[in-house]
Image (cartoon, rainbow, N blue to C red):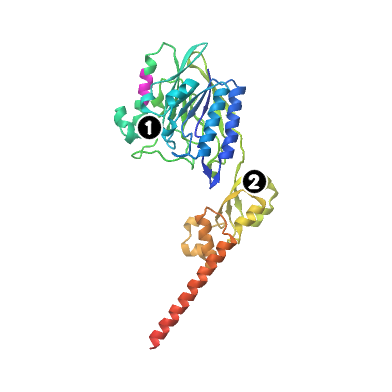
Amino acid sequence: MRMLHTSDWHLGRSFHRVGMLEHQAVFLDHLVEVVRSQRVDVVVVAGDVYDRALPSVDTVRLLNDAVERIVDAGAQLVLTSGNHDSADRLGFGGRVLERGGVHLRTRVEDLARPVLVADDHGEVAIYGVPYLEPALVADRLGSARTHQGVLAAAAERVRDDLGERAPGTRSVLAAHAFVVGGEISESERDISVGGVSSVPAAVFAGVDYVALGHLHGPQRISDTIRYSGSPLAYSFGEAGHHKRSWLVDVGEHGRCSVESVPAPVPRPLAVLSGELDELLNDPRLGGAERSWCHVSLTDPVRPRAAMERLRTRFPHTLVVAFEPRGERPESLTYAQRLRGRSPIEVCCGFVEHARGGDAVADGDRALLADALEGGRRAQDEADLEGRRTGAA
């Protein structure tokens, strides 16, 4: 049985206020082609299909189209809900969709109801464990109100069901969880409960392959316990990631062979640091000209119109930080950070910071200048009135 393990699509997500739906569509086109060319039997998506509980109409349409094409390419589809999804909304119509090969696992009641896929060696039971919010499901599972408690109870239900099946039945468990040994990224939402956010891999003992979702970096906890990671980078901290899916062959006696399937990169990430003029003229940075860029400027004095000037060479610059060489910004006092800057530069700097590095437009700069001038005149009039009152 051949399975494609993927997760954390986060359909509808934006990257520093830039919509990613077009790039997510590129990944889904790639995934459908992999299903077709590699003769994939089952696609498993381990949670966070959507980025939010109420996705936009265009986002829902994108998923609907992808589901239809995956099934048409010859694969069944197993989708679990993650901590970003609305389990009820994602799971709507699940019983009907199963007739067409689309299996939604979003409810506690379905933890031990596997999707059964047959091959020459018998059946493979695929169990889907959605993200389990301890406060909501612990009582129903009879477990402690912790991430580990609810997952351990869910895995026990899976083992109980597996024990009642024919000897030799192979198993796959898809779960949205934070497993000990996994490396976090900046773009994941914390799921810690009571200070405990991770579970030991031993929780999943007795299962032939564990397809994990939640962490955005592809990684191997063990040979048979893996995170596929997100198909696209959703933070600059993921600039070093090599995004992928896992192609898993579940053979006789549950032996698994795993192959990496690199994901397309519609636009790479670049993290740049240096003085503005150096960055604009460095021939070694040609590759960053088509990348999303995070730029740390090390000039001793903040350059004027830094964002506009950077975008003349790096048009996809999204974030600009000012970090003078030799000084750590977090170690400077507020007065030191403002030294040498005019009132209008202070105001524009604040607006740029609040907007995530976006430059202040000429019109906005003029409004700020008018406001500063109005404030100055009001202060002068108040001072003059004070002197008159004192003289009287």
In the image, 186 versus 71, the foreground residue is: 71
Identity of the residue furthest to the bottom in this view: 392
Task: Give the residue drawn at x 40%, y 38%.
Answer: 191
Q: Give whichever of 358, 54 is nearer the camera.
A: 54
Asked if residue 157 lies in the magenta stretch, the reply is yes
Up-down: is 374 above or below 16?
below
Q: Which residue is mark 2?
A: 288
Q: Secondary structure at mark 1?
A: loop
Q: At which x and y percent is residue 16?
A: 53, 47
Cα distance between the residues tagged 1 and 2: 40 Å
Instruction: Give the SS element for disc 2.
Output: helix
Whether label 1 touches label 2, CB < 8 Å: no
Within the image, what quadrant is residue 158 found in?
top left
Which amino acid type is marked by label 2? Ala
Earlier residue among tags 1 and 2: 1
How packed is label 2: few (under 14 Cα within 10 Å), some, or many (20 or more)?
many
Q: Residue furthest toward the right?
A: 283
Residue stretch in magenta: 154-160
Q: Which mark is residue 132?
A: 1
Q: Is residue 52 magenta?
A: no
Question: Is residue 110 in sight in this rendering?
Answer: yes
Could you tell me which quadrant the C terminus lies in?
Answer: bottom left
Residue 185 on image: x %, y %: 49, 40
Classify residue 302 as left or right of residue 45.
right
Query: Looking at the picture, which amino acid does disc 1 mark?
Result: Leu
Location of residue 387 in the rendering, given as x and y in whole percent from the top left corner: 42, 84
